[in-house]
Amino acid sequence: MISLNINKSRIINLFSFLRFRLLLLIFMIVLPFFGVIIYTSMEEYKIAAAENKNKAVELVQIAADSQNQLIEGVQQFLAVLSHLPEVKGRDPSACNVLFSKLLQQYPSYANLGISQSNGNIICSGVPFHRKLNMSDRTYFRHAIETGRFSTGNFQIGRITGKPTINFGYPLFDQTGKAQKVLFAALDLSWLNQFASRAELPPGSILTVLDQTGTILVRYPNPGKWVGKSIPDIPMIKTILSQHKGIEETTDLDGNLHFLGFTSLVGNQETGNLSISIGIPKQSVFSGINHMFTLNLTILAVTMILGFLGAWIGSDFFVLKKINVLVKTSNQLAGNNLSARTGIVYGKGELDQLAYTIDKMADSLQANASAIQYQATHDFLTKLPNANLLHDRLDQAIKTAKRNNKSLALLMLDINHFKEINHTLGHHFGNLLLLLLGPRLQNVLRQSDTIAHLGGDKFAILLQDSDINGAKSVTRKILKVLEEQFILADHPVLVETCIGIALYPDHGETSDILLQRADVAMSKAKEEKSDYFVYIQDEDHNTPRRLVIMGALREAINRNQLILHYQPKINLKTGGLAGAEALVRWQHPELGPIAPDQFIPLAEKTGLIKPLTYHVLNTAVNQCQSWCQEGININVAVNLSTRNLLDQKLPDDLMEMLDKAHVLPSSLGIEITESVIMLNPERAMEILKRLSGMGIQLSIDDFGTGYSSLMYLNKLPVNEIKIDKSFVINMLTDKDSDMIVRSTIHLAHNLGLKVVAEGVENKETWDRLKTMGCDYVQGFYISKPLSAEQFIHWLDHSPWRINRQMNNTGPKAA
Ligand code: C2E
Ligand code: CA
Ligand code: CA
């Protein structure tokens, strides 16, 4: 069953091949011809068989007639002899002489003679010496008993010693009783010679049998068969039992024959001689067989030629094209989209198919290249994106390595880009980004790559460039960017800073080069210079940094992070207005680690959330325990970029406050502008919720970002903290002084309180007081202190306050 199924499926598989189908078609066309040939041959066989049966009947009849004539001839001969005196007379010697003379005349007879009624021979043509008796011979007995001409069986003559067939003719006395028998022995060898003269179809066999089944005559090959008594052979049996007929039977030699047979004249009582003629089927059908084989061969050859033609022809006319189509389709499926059939399109179906496949390949290729383009180019500027830059950088590094050359990677960032976006709108920002590429292109070589990495960040790959080349290109870039951009009629001046990293001096892989160019760019920004070439030490991604990153989580879990508190003083009353909580980390091995070192890391690794929660929790609990000691001050906590994207923060904070029984108004939150600008909508939403809870909100490090006060005013903030860089410099730097003053002025106009950070001396304190600043914070008042130190400071510092917070100012300055 299984093997049957396998065979079936194999055939079905085969059938799916076009070539096989073609061959099958040819076979099916040829098949009826085979049928016709077989059918006509069968008909021919039938006709030939019928014809030959008739022929056999006819031939046997003719042969029988001639044999009958022969026998009748014998009868007449004997009848004539019976009237001769030598025969009638009593002189045996006269009789002997006559017969011997006759024998000479008629060589067909082996002997002629007379027997007495008792069987004793009294006269013979062939002399005999002994006393011989014939009474046992059938022909003799029959002739005596019936008084009629009788035929004998095969016998070897007792006188002649020859194989003969004998005939007896009765001689009557006066009373009419058969007294003697005149006999004639017909020589079988003569008879066989006679038979050989019969004109028979080639291969035919003539046989004469006596009634005992002994062969008398046989043509051809009498020597082998004559005298043989074989009544049990089927053919002989048929002849002896049926007397007359036509049969298909095997002859003595074992070949199939159409056998016609009949009995010869003779006595019913003694039985007759029979004659048969066999026409070999072989010879009858050989013509038809020959024709049949010839036809079959021709047809088979035709079919094979047809198969061959189909095999080769299908290759030429059909399969060649189909194979091309299949190959092309496979190539396309294997993502080789440049594959085409190469077929010249005609009107045929296969040509149409080839056309369709080629068209399909065209559009696939077009789509693929569009996708490829999108994957490697910036959507807005159409410049190569970070992916493509990466690839090109990899490639360029390989080439440089091979040729022992160096290359430079420039990282460029537009200063105040956010300001342009916010003041003029995103459309203008985009326009600027669009114009930047072509302008940069003007000062670069064709082989250099400008990539847009997103936002306002661009990278420029300078192939085959050393430090001097990189610097010179950088200066050219800066020069060309000094010229103002016209953004829809608005002239805009653009400031950029560029970081430079070189292969192989600063890094040997694309990742490292990109990172180092970025570090260099940050440094340029930090130093407010146009460009900066990477220096190892400036990279903060040192092993120490990595160690810190690894240890930070543990530090949070193990409570290694503690809070210090820096007092905030009301400048007008001189009283304590609150404290800013600042995180401190005392690492067991690395020693104290400044927040500036680990906060940015925490922001990058996602540890900022647990860190902030830890700080918030500690601050809230501290607030609560101070409260119990009668110190009711506002404790402010710094929030990071990511914290302000965390929707859960307000609820979690509320829960913390509830748990510690601390009023939300006792908590302050400090956020920088950049935090808000990252996602203004989300930040706005969270800030609103925090403010709604009653939490005090401050904008930290004001002046370092690009946002305007007008914009910040839309936020639910209570105060701004002027960045310490302005405050520290305000006594020496007029610009800083001016910025501090105008900020205070503007903030007040908008209803915001102002905190000055970084107050390091009395002069600054005083100056701020004249400017109308609300609060101050800085080393002049106090460094950030641990909780215990803070209590101690409260009790001993010049700004000592009573625990009810009604102190009006410093006791001493
Ligand atoms: P910040 O929020 O501007 O904090 C004020 C920083 O100025 C503190 O540095 C403080 O020690 C320092 N400072 C105070 N008075 C003076 C002064 O008179 N002169 C000078 N030169 N410096 C003064 P610190 O503690 O090293 O913190 C640095 C920054 O780390 C903070 O700047 C804040 O942005 C961040 N930070 C600190 N603690 C946390 C925190 O718990 N969470 C978050 N997210 N950030 C924190
Ligand atoms: Ca702060
Ligand atoms: Ca600050």
Image (spheres, rainbow, N blue to C red):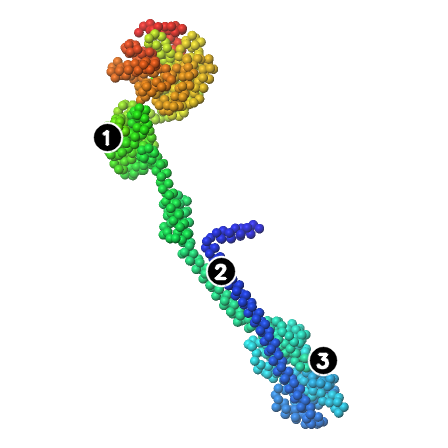
Name the secondary structure under disc 3. loop
Side of 712 relative to 71 (left or right): left
Tell me which label, 1 or 2, sits earlier in the chain. Answer: 2
Residue 502 in view? no
Number of numbered markers? 3
Check whether the beta carbons of the residues at disc 2 and disc 3 lie within 8 A of each other.
Answer: no
Q: Residue at x 24, y 33 (%)?
A: 443
Name the residue rendered at 48%, 64% in the picture: 299
Position in image of residue 489 (x %, y %): 26, 28
**Residue at mark 2:** 29
Q: Measure how far apart labels 2 and 3 are at the Cα level.
A: 66 Å
> Residue furthest toward the front?
489
The residue located at (31%, 7%) in the rendering is 813
| Mark 2: amino acid | Ile
Q: Relative to 93, is 646 on the left or the right?
A: left
Q: Is label 1 in a helix, a strand or a loop?
A: helix
Label 2: which secondary element: helix
Q: Quadrant of residue 594?
A: top left
Q: Earlier in the sequence, mark 1 or mark 3?
A: 3
Residue that badge 1 annotates: 480
Q: Nearer the viewer, mark 2 or mark 3?
A: 2
The residue type indicated by label 3 comes to Glu
